[in-house]
Every structure is written in structure tokens, then in C-alpha cells.
Amino acid sequence: MARIVVKFGGTSVADIDRIKDAALRIQAEAKGGNQVVAVVSAMAGVTNQMVALTDQMGALFDAREYDAIVSTGEQSNAGLMALALQTLGVQARSWLGWQIPIRTDGVHGKARITGIETEELERRLNTGEVAVVAGFQGIGPDGRITTLGRGGSDLTAVALAGALNAERCDIYTDVDGIYTSDPRVVPKARKLDHVTYDEMLEMASLGSKVLQTRSVELAMNHGVRIQVRSAFSGAPGTFVVNEDEIVEQQIVSGISDSKDDAKITLLRVADRPGVAAGIFGPLAEAAINVDMIVQNVSEDGKTDLTFTVGKSDLKAAAGLLKENQADIGYEELISDPDVVKVSVVGVGMRSHAGVAQKMFQTLADEGINIQVITTSEIKVSVLVAGKFGEQAVRALHTAYGLDVE
Ligand code: ADP
Ligand code: ASP
Ligand code: MG
């Protein structure tokens, strides 16, 4: 008897009819002789509504109450799914994060899972009961509800699959797999049969939100077999696998884009030792992540420094830098939230030259100016003006031969 985890995202459980459809899939898995853990998200849009309600309540922000509010969509869907299964004659019950419990650290809003106590859950699975688990949530050291960051139901599913030694973890969603690019942006995007953990990790962190980044990281570390597949068709999806399982390796597997970044430029910074530390120290202390960095030294000993931070951190970062202007010694700060980071990802880059050059040439041919560049072993990212984001993604998709015929 195999143990499996299935996860249904927001659109796959967006209303009663869809919950009933998803329940039929769960029933089929259980009838096939599997022990089934079904992780459910909130109905599509519900978490956003909860976030908006929290915002409307005003300036006083208590992250513990934020979590109490935004986790509710998963709670009601877990109950509804358990009812749908019972209606089909399937033995099932709902589990909230704290009831299992899924233990997390105390970082409300983006908590990390520290451990899962599976004893009672396993005992019930062994009796044939389906466990319907509310995704996205756990319990912190203070006994309060925590949430795992947006898209966090993926993490719930992967973490449970790891803790329960599940044979597979099927992520049901509104696309039938992982594509070379977001199919909503690139109509010619191609579905991949397989993608490596490394590539999916880069793609997710660079904006392909089909899987939450941390869920991919956890799957990689624990060897969890993920399949991303459609909740609306029976077709096989995309498997996230180790590199050695891929027979024919593409040089480039995907193009990602992210609108989550913002650019800051400091003009005419003094060019002397310690300046970069003076700039990035206060940002690090405030837990503001800096991603891409470029520095140009001009002949008069002054330098311009450009870097990116998360869009949601832009205000705080600019504020801190202005506070420290005299110490750092720059003349002007320019911030620009209207940028897109476009990235080319592929493990084949490790062994093939010229990938970056093709990217730069393609963007040049399109007349798109590159503002900042960063690279890693398996990706090249560039920052371009917001209005060029989609054009850049489509042109690169064609240039690397990824378009479907
Ligand atoms: P769910 O609610 O099921 O978790 P998400 O909206 O989080 O679904 O993720 C699915 C969406 O991810 C798709 O609708 C698609 O637009 C988007 N997406 C972004 N990049 C990709 C990609 N490379 N392949 C497939 N889907 C992608
Ligand atoms: N409902 C949560 C969100 O919208 C978690 C999830 O769907 O994965 O972020
Ligand atoms: Mg998701």
C-alpha cells in the first residue's frame, strides 16, 4: 500500500463543484489502495480578501493576528473537503496545522516548519481514513497560528510528504504542468515532462510561482517526488527530479520573469574602502535582502551604485539610506519600482558557453536596454524597464528555441 500526498491549489477548490471534483480524485486514489493525505488551499482569491480586510483595519499591525485571519480560508476548505469525501462514502476528517501539529518557528507571516508530529495522523491513515489537511499553516513556539508565506500550501504538502515518507506528492493546479515560461505570458510556452530540482528552485525564486520556492528547496533536500498536474484533466504533469534522471538535457529549460523587484541607484558615491559595507550594512540589519548589484567607477573617483531590493522593501530601504546619507557620502538617491527581472535558467549552462551572450544580443535586437545583470551557475538574470518585461520574455523564449511548433 502506497502513501501519497495530493495538494489542491486555490482554483482547484474555488467553489463547491470544484471541491466535489477534487474529492472524486481523492476517492479514486483511496480506492486504488493508497493512504491519502489531501492538502487544500483556500478558495482562489480568499487569502487576498483576508489580507485586504487586515489592511483596512488600520495601521496597527500585529503579525500574530494577521496569521489568525489569513489562515481561515484553508480551515473552511478543509472542512468542506472532508464533508465532500464523507458524502462519497469515504472515511475522512479535517486537520488544521495545530491539530497535527505542524510546528514552526515564530516568524509570523512566513514561518519555517521546524517539525511535524505524525503519530496520530499515521495511526488514522492506517485505518484507511483520508487526512484532509489545511495548507499554509502551522503552530508557533508561543502556541499561536502561523502561516508559511504566500503559496505556502505547496510547502505543507511537500513537508508532509517528506515527514510521512510518501511515495509521491501530486500538486494539482490550473495548468497541466511546469512550462518553459508562464503560459499566461508566453502563449508558445512548452510543457516540460521533467525539470530538475535546481532549475525549478531558480525558476520559482525568479518569479515562476507555479511552486512556492521553499517547497522546492524542501523537496530537493528530502528527495520528495513532486508532480505538478492539472486538476481539470487526467493528463500526466511535470515531474521535478534529480539531474541524473533526465536523459536529454536542454541547455536552457525556462525563462522566468518577476515584478517583485525595485531598483535603487546612489549617484556619485565616494570610491573608498568600506563604502559598500556602509550602504549594505544597515539594509542587512533591517532584514532587507539585496539581490542584483552593479557599480560603475568614474574617473573622478566617484561611483554610481545600482542594486535591487524587494518592491515591498523599497520604502524602508530608501528611508534607511537617506538617514545614513551623510555617513555613506552619496549625492543623490533615485528609486525605481517600475522594473522587471527576466531570467534564463538551465542546468546545461554549466557546460555550454554563449548562453549569456545570446540573451544580451536578443535584447539588443529588440531595442531593450539592460539595467543590471547577475549570473549564477545555471541562470542569467537581467533587469529591464517594466514595459519591456513581457516582450523580453517572449523574444528570449523564441531565441533559445523553446517555442512550441
Ligand atoms: P495554485 O493556486 O494551484 O497554487 P498558482 O497560481 O500558485 O496555483 O500557480 C499556478 C500558476 O502559475 C499558473 O496559472 C501559471 O500562470 C503560473 N506560472 C508561472 N510560471 C509558470 C510556469 N513556468 N509553468 C507553469 N505555470 C506557471
Ligand atoms: N492560500 C494561500 C495563498 O494564497 C496559500 C496557498 O494557496 O498556497 O497564498
Ligand atoms: Mg500556488
Image: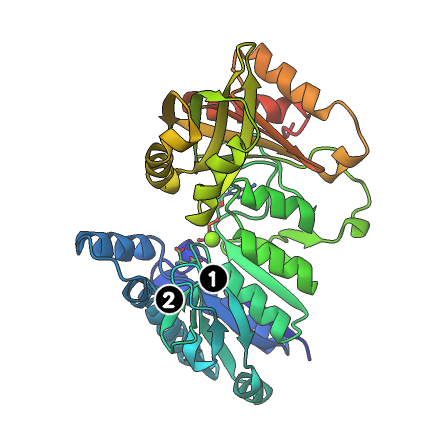
> What's the residue at 60%, 55% (across, down)?
216
Query: Is 102 displayed left or right of 336 in the figure?
Result: right
> What's the residue at 45%, 37% (across, down)?
309
Q: Is residue 13 above or below residue 48?
A: below
Name the amino acid, label 2. Answer: Glu
Q: Under tag 2, what secondary structure?
A: helix
Q: Which mark is residue 348?
A: none
Query: Is 133 displayed left or right of 127 in the figure?
Result: left
> What's the residue at 46%, 29% (across, down)?
340
User: Residue 255 location in percent, x, y?
Assistant: 59, 33
Q: Under tag 1, what secondary structure?
A: helix
Answer yes or no: is residue 184 visible: no
Is the CB of the residue bearing disc 1 within 8 angstroms of ligand 2? yes
Labels 1 and 2: the sequence-earlier one? 2
The answer to whether mark 1 and mark 2 are in CB contact below 8 A is yes
User: Residue 315 location in percent, x, y?
Assistant: 32, 38
Query: Is 133 displayed left or right of 125 in the figure?
Result: left
Answer yes or no: is residue 170 visible: yes
Is the CB of the residue bearing disc 2 within 8 angstroms of ligand 2? yes
Counting other residues with Cα less than 10 Å from the Cα at mark 2, is it few (<14), some (14-19), or many (20 or more)?
many
Q: Which mark is residue 74?
A: 2
Q: Nearer the viewer, residue 320 or 190?
A: 320
User: Residue 391 location in percent, x, y?
Assistant: 50, 21
Q: Which mark is residue 153?
A: 1
Q: Quadrant of residue 1?
A: bottom right
The span from disc 1 to disc 2 (Cα, nearest Å) is 9 Å
Q: Nearer the viewer, residue 275 or 280?
A: 275
> What's the residue at 28%, 54% (across, down)?
51
Name the quadrant where ligand 2 sits: bottom left
Q: Is residue 23 above or below residue 215?
A: below
